[in-house]
Amino acid sequence: MVDAILGLQWGDEGKGKIVDYFAPRYDIIARFQGGPNAGHTLYVNGDKIVLHQIPSGVFHENTSNLIGNGVVLDPVTLLKECATVARFGVDVKKNLFISHRAHLILPTHRALDKASELSKGHDKIGSTLKGISPAYMDKTGRNGLRVGDLLDKSFITSYIRLRLKHQKLLDNYGFTEDIAAWEEEFFEALEFLKQLNIVNGEYYINSQISEGKTVLAEGAQGSMLDIDFGTFPFVTSSNTTTAGVCSGLGVAPQKIREVIGVTKAYCTRVGGGPFPTELTNETGEELRKLGNEFGATTGRPRRCGWIDLVALKFACMVNGVTKMVMTKADVLDSFTELQACTGYKIDDIVVDAVPFQMTRVNIDPQYTSMPGWNTNTTEKKSPNELPGKMVQYVNFINEYVGVPVKYISNGPGRDQIVTV
Ligand code: GDP
Ligand code: IMO
Ligand code: MG
């Protein structure tokens, strides 16, 4: 039995906190896609930790954590992260498992990401520069190197061959940065990686499921960054949606039970690309300030806006979301009026569907206004303590989207969550 936790917007919905909250109920937490472009923030005994590669269940002694085949793995980031979690007493040799089919991010992938972004100028995607797109290109282009390849003596020959290919591409871009230092850390990190639990992920997870163990699949990024269903080309390079759970872990669709979608009470996006409800005014600034909206991976300021119910309903549809978690509800505590986008006006026609090419049409978001609760909610523990106007806001969303919000997160802390 597998449940999934996925982002329903453009990433940074608070998945890390929510996975950490649910983790004690599961035996295995498994990342199925993405790589170090992810930045999942958790608070462990008051200390803030941002995880990029390791699943967010790692701080629970009785959970195992799997980096699935659908993930692209940067050994350097992993090494650093293992050192961070070790300081909190986590023994990764005991509770971290890595699929031998996960593809490696090479130093030249990072260089190619940078070169590609530079060549795009104003039209750049705004990637995290972690080498994600080149690594997935080598996967689908059938050139990539996988974690399991490390254990083969032909690895170094394959590495040199691929590196030469990358060098030609870099020369084409006119990229001249010296990456010798990156390569040095890469090879050091590979030695560390070899000592970890490299497993046959698909057999590992299916045998655990057969024994009655429970799995929580942890999504990275968000549905609107999905390579197929997101705001292409301003997306990431993997399937961030539920289908990615099957291909990224090797589990069959009928094994998936709950799909828990995480949405902020408003909306953010980092990097380029369409964002219909973006507020470039004082209200947007207020949301960024109150929500501390700065990227967990890159530190970039996040673009902020009102909740987009058209996009949220679309995300629930493609994912088959069974229940939602609304995070950062407390960020709206001081607002006297709230807006929710319930339609897109395109060429004078209001639609409630996400258009094929969001970048080519001019979307005028249509809003429904609601009163804000204007009350501090960060200490609330039970649903009957929540202000009526917050309940009204949530009910409006439930009704529009057709999927219920079952949890409201009212602060970054581990215990700041109300089950409704
Ligand atoms: P993720 O990538 O989806 O895991 O989200 P990030 O960690 O990138 O960003 C979410 C940010 O919001 C982090 O700084 C969290 O600590 C914080 N956060 C999560 N839930 C809440 C909440 O309910 N209220 C507030 N104020 N902050 C939250
Ligand atoms: P988490 O898991 C928010 C965005 C980048 C860029 C686009 C492509 O923390 O929610 P990439 O490096 O993947 O090629 O960048 O996707 N992006 C994210 N935005 N949260 C993330 O992850 C993201 N991972 C990638 O900003 O616009
Ligand atoms: Mg994040």
Image (cartoon, rainbow, N blue to C red):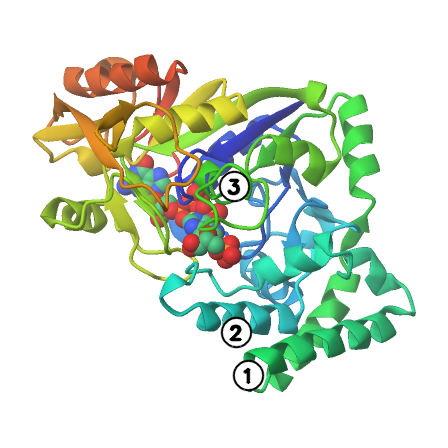
Q: Earlier in the sequence, mark 2 or mark 1?
A: 2
User: Decide: marks 2, 1 in contact (CB < 8 A)?
Assistant: yes
**158 sits to left or right of 326:** right
**Amino acid beneath label 3:** Asp
User: Decide: marks 3, 1 in contact (CB < 8 A)?
Assistant: no
SS at badge 1: loop
Q: Is residue 183 above or below residue 123?
A: below
Residue 226 badge: 3
Q: Residues within 10 Å of mark 1 (few under 14, many from 20)?
A: few
**Amino acid beneath label 2:** Ala
Q: Give the number of marks.
A: 3
> Which residue is at the front of the view, 268 or 50?
268
Q: Is residue 71 above or below residue 364?
A: below
**338 sits to left or right of 66:** left
Q: Residues within 10 Å of mark 3 (few under 14, many from 20)?
A: many
> Which residue is at the front of the view, 353 or 223?
353
User: Decide: marks 3, 2 in contact (CB < 8 A)?
Assistant: no
Marks 3/2: CA–CA distance: 23 Å
Percent of width and height locating residue 229: 51, 36
Can see residue 70?
Answer: yes
**377 sits to left or right of 197:** left
Q: Which residue is mark 2?
A: 115
Where is residue 130, by image quadrant? Answer: bottom right
SS at badge 3: loop
**Amino acid beneath label 1:** Gly
Residue at 70%, 36% (x, y): give it.
247
Percent of width and height locating residue 121: 39, 70
**Quadrant into which the N terminus falls:** top right
> Which residue is at the front of the view, 258 or 112?
112
Marks 2/1: CA–CA distance: 8 Å
Q: Which residue is mark 1?
A: 174
